[in-house]
Amino acid sequence: MATGEDGFALVFSLVMLVVITLLGVWALNTSTLEIMISGNRQVFEENFNMAEGGAMSESGKLGYAGTATFPWYMVNDPSLLNQLLVPPVGVGPGKYDFGGDLTSGSAAAYAALLTPTGAGDPTNWPMENLLHSIAPADNRMDYSYLVTYLNPDTPPKGYDAAMFSSYKFRINGHKNTDVEVGGMKVGVKIAI
């Protein structure tokens, strides 16, 4: 006697198997996409931290006389506003590119590259390494930077405004992303 339901369990099982397989493939694709998003976010965070660390490292070199190991920045003429600054030549291991990524170790060559048009291009900026390492294996810690002296201003409270001035700077750090920090150093007022 035929009831019209012969083979229903087989067809139902095959349909459910296809549905479950499609759900499994969708879940695998979703997790793969989430892993890729997470990896890209991790790379971005690492690059951001390198750029920020580089900008903060360079800001620490502003206005100090320096040592034989680390470069520094000095503003010789504070009346020249918006000056792009590069460290002096002969600092550290004979140049200020500790990462060994640049072809020229001359501050004059970098100053020539850092024209108003070239200053917007981080590939023209000097490079440094957060570990101050010249080993090629440490290039993961490399960053580009640009230091700009902006202008003098009144010193903060507690300083004699007749004798002291605050000197304002902008420091850009770059490693596939840009970080810009501002800062000031207080120093003896130089006649402008």
Image (cartoon, rainbow, N blue to C red):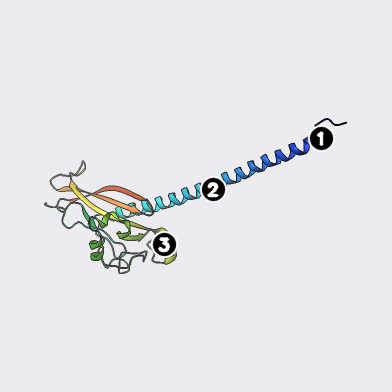
Q: Earlier in the sequence, mark 1 or mark 2?
A: 1
What's the amino acid at mark 1? Asp
Q: Nearer the viewer, mark 1 or mark 2?
A: 1
Q: Is residue 58 left or right of residue 20?
A: left
Badge 1 crowding class, 10 Å Cα cut-off, few under 14, some 14 to 19, many 20 or more, is few
Q: Please state which amino acid type lies under the numbered disc 2.
A: Ile
Point 19% across, 44% down: residue: 155
Tell me: 28 left or right of 175: right
Residue at mark 3:
139
Image quarter (top left, top right, bottom left or bottom right) of the N terminus: top right
Left or right of 82? Residue 61 is right
Q: Is residue 29 left or right of residue 96?
A: right
Query: Element type at marker 3?
Result: helix
**As drawn, which residue projects farthest toward the left?**
191
Q: Circle 2: is it few (<14), some (14-19), or many (20+) Cα within 10 Å?
A: few
Circles 3 and 2, Cβ within 8 Å, touching? The answer is no
Image coords of residue 77 (percent x, y): 15, 56
Q: Secondary structure at mark 1?
A: loop
For label 2, the residue is 35
Q: Which mark is residue 6?
A: 1
- Locate residue 182, reporting x and y percent: 28, 47
